[in-house]
Image: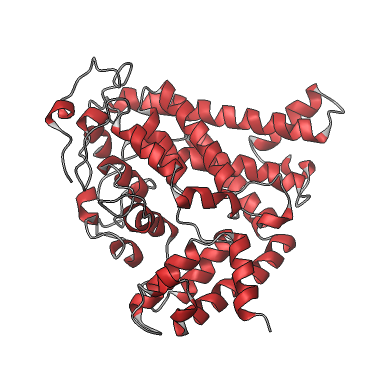
Amino acid sequence: MSRPSEKTAAFEPNSAFARGRAPYASWPEASRGRVFAEPESPTRSCFQRDRDRIIHSTAFRRLKHKTQVFVYHEGDHYRTRLTHSLEVAQIARSIARVLALDEDLAEALALSHDLGHPPFGHAGEAALARSMSRYGGFDHNAQTLRIVTKLEHRYAEFDGLNLTWESLEGIVKHNGPLVDSSGVRAVPKSMSESYDRLDELDLGSYPSAEAQVAALSDGIAYNNHDIDDGLRAGLFAVDDLLALPFVGRVFSDLMDRYPGLEMSRLIHEAVRRMISDMIEDVLRETQSRLAAFKPETANHVRNLGSPLIAFSQEMQANDKALKAFLTAKMYRHDKVISMTRKAQPVIGDLFDLFLAAPDRLPAEWYAQCNGPNTMETAKIVCDFIAGMTDRFAFDAHKRHLSL
């Protein structure tokens, strides 16, 4: 990684970017830099620039028509990858602010975490992984890394977004170290093939506190908002939730306090209170860990051997119970499974078509291929399909494969 210019590399606690930031936060002035050296901005920190580059990327815009759970045409009020990412970013900024972390880095990682998802949500990822099983596999985190380091073509001097080391680290390791229980490197093949400087990201350590905040914010957002979407879609009822710890208590308390409250208000009140309670739990648990670990730098956070940002044990159990409920009642609901069955063949059919006949790809994609049924062509086809929105994938399938 290139280092920032001498002017900005020094640790400057009194700088405009550093006011109120904790010593264990990620300091933009001490960033490990970018792969391609660039002049620093006089008005934005390096993490602000990362956030802005993500927002302006093509991959980020496409999230508005990519499935969270429901496919795009099923209703205007269900979450998409875009609205989910914005909600994750709001939660991440809230937590980062209270903990005196770098809000811009936390937000950048929250906004980027779903960039690599293909169309049709987890069903699309499973279908693309099957198609790519002979060619290195497919993993949405690896695809996010590939997007920000290679596939975005916006700048004259480099491919990708040329994000800082800290942002790349957070994208790769936001769920923790990439090693197995015995400490052996455990990286998806598709990720190691996506970025040839992967080892520079210190794969055996935890990520920054900001990356940990973004990962936990993702869980808070999708669990609560899937309750919202699932209730509004009629996949389950409020009565089904009452036996759940934490969730059932929130709904019961609201119904006791506001008998006869209309359903839309009840759902919104419950979801916002659950999000608030989960954020407060994270803050309490993290404050306890801060007192125990006393981290003095961002690198100290990385090398603690366990997460700094976490739920309490009680909330972890609540979260596990909620995930199990949503898996059974929502993700495996007949309505969702039915759409999965319609969506997955679209991915497989398009992959097989373009792999065998890459000349059917748009010209700029075809130019990167080296003939039918090759490893390199498979990767290009995978990139093309992974970037599709739900709507584009359906349209492409109809255009190329309808009888």
Residue 198 drawn above or below residue 279: below
Q: Quadrant location of residue 14?
A: top left
Residue 7 picture location, percent across and down: 15, 26
Residue 6 picture location, percent across and down: 12, 30
In the displayed structure image, the side of residue 75 where residue 288 appears, left or right: left
In the displayed structure image, the side of residue 232 where residue 394 appears, left or right: left
Q: Residue at x 58, y 42 (%)?
A: 83
Residue at far left of view: 6
Residue 159 picture location, percent across and down: 30, 55
Q: Residue at x 40, y 37 (%)?
A: 52
Q: Quadrant location of residue 82?
A: top right
User: In this figure, what is the number of numbered marks?
Assistant: 0
Residue 242 makes an appearance in the image: yes
Q: Residue at x 57, y 78 (%)?
A: 349
Q: Quadrant location of residue 309?
A: top left
Residue 211 makes an appearance in the image: no
Residue 387 drawn above or below residue 37: below
Residue at far right of view: 260
**Camera-nearest residue between 115 and 257:** 115
Q: Which colour style is shown?
A: secondary structure
Residue 341 drawn above or below residue 53: below
Q: Residue at x 30, y 22 (%)?
A: 17
Residue 210 picture location, percent across and down: 36, 34
**Camera-nearest residue between 247 and 209:** 209
Name the image quarter holding the C terminus: bottom right
